[in-house]
Image: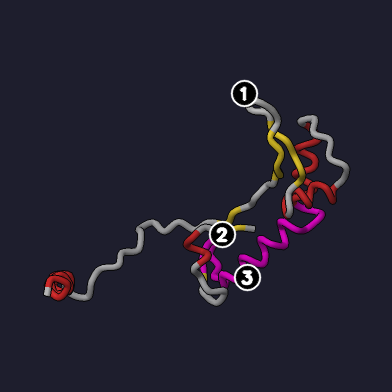
């Protein structure tokens, strides 16, 4: 489970409000981890979707590994000299994007000017 930069800098005790409810960020992170790791939810849905497209994973445990550690894989790109070995992994990212970016404005408009003058001295 990954979090975008904004949520990485949030404390678990910070709060978030959506759908007419307020919860701690830590509660949301815990719920998302449970959803990703729960064998009856996301792995089952992913297993079914992959199976319908012809992917033959051994079992649900392999699908869960795809979500957590990744599975050994090889990719052959057009124009490449051969197969490239690596891992394939499905990542789930929880994001929060502020409507207005945070700005770090100086306390006083003169602070920047003072700082520049001190650097030149």
Q: With 119 as the anchor, is 95 left or right in this view?
A: right
Q: Mark 3 points at which residue?
A: 27
Q: In 3D space, how far apart are the residues under numbered discs 3 and 2 (Cα atoms)?
A: 14 Å
Q: What element carries label 3?
A: helix
Residue 50: horizontal and vertical position, in percent? 76, 37
Q: Nearer the viewer, mark 1 or mark 3?
A: 1
Residue 53 is labelled as none
Q: What element carries label 2?
A: strand
Q: Residues within 10 Å of mark 2 (few under 14, many from 20)?
A: some
Q: Residue at x 79, y 34 (%)?
A: 55
Q: Which of 116 and 4 is in front in this view?
A: 116
Q: With 9 as the anchor, is 39 left or right in this view?
A: right
The quarter of the displayed image where residue 28 is located? bottom right
Does the segment drawn in magenta span residue 31? yes
The quarter of the displayed image where residue 77 is located? top right
Q: Nearer the viewer, residue 11 or 41?
A: 11
Whichever of labels 1 and 2 marks the residue nearer the N terminus, that label is 2
Residue 45: horizontal and vertical position, in percent? 76, 45
The segment highlighted magenta reads: 16-41
Q: With 113 as the anchor, is 76 left or right in this view?
A: right
Q: Name the residue under label 1.
A: 78
Picture quarter with the N terminus: bottom right
Q: Which of 98 and 82 is in front in this view?
A: 82
Q: Name the residue under label 2.
A: 3
Residue 119: horizontal and vertical position, in percent? 17, 72
Picture quarter with the C terminus: bottom left
Q: In 3D space, how far apart are the residues under numbered discs 1 and 2 (Cα atoms)?
A: 33 Å
Residue contact between numbered discs 3 and 2, judged by CB atoms under 8 Å: no
């Amino acid at each position: 489970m990954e979090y975008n930069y904004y949520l990485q800098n949030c404390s678990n005790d910070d709060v978030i409000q959506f759908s007419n409810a307020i919860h701690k960020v830590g509660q949301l992170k815990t719920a998302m981890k449970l959803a990703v790791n729960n064998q009856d939810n996301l792995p089952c849905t992913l297993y079914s979707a992959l199976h319908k497209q012809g992917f033959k994973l051994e079992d649900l445990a392999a699908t869960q590994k795809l979500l957590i550690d990744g599975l050994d894989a090889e990719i052959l790109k057009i124009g490449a000299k051969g197969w490239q070995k690596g891992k394939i992994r499905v990542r789930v990212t929880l994001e929060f994007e502020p409507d207005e970016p945070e700005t770090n404005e100086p306390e006083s408009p003169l602070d920047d000017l003072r700082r520049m003058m001190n650097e030149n001295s």
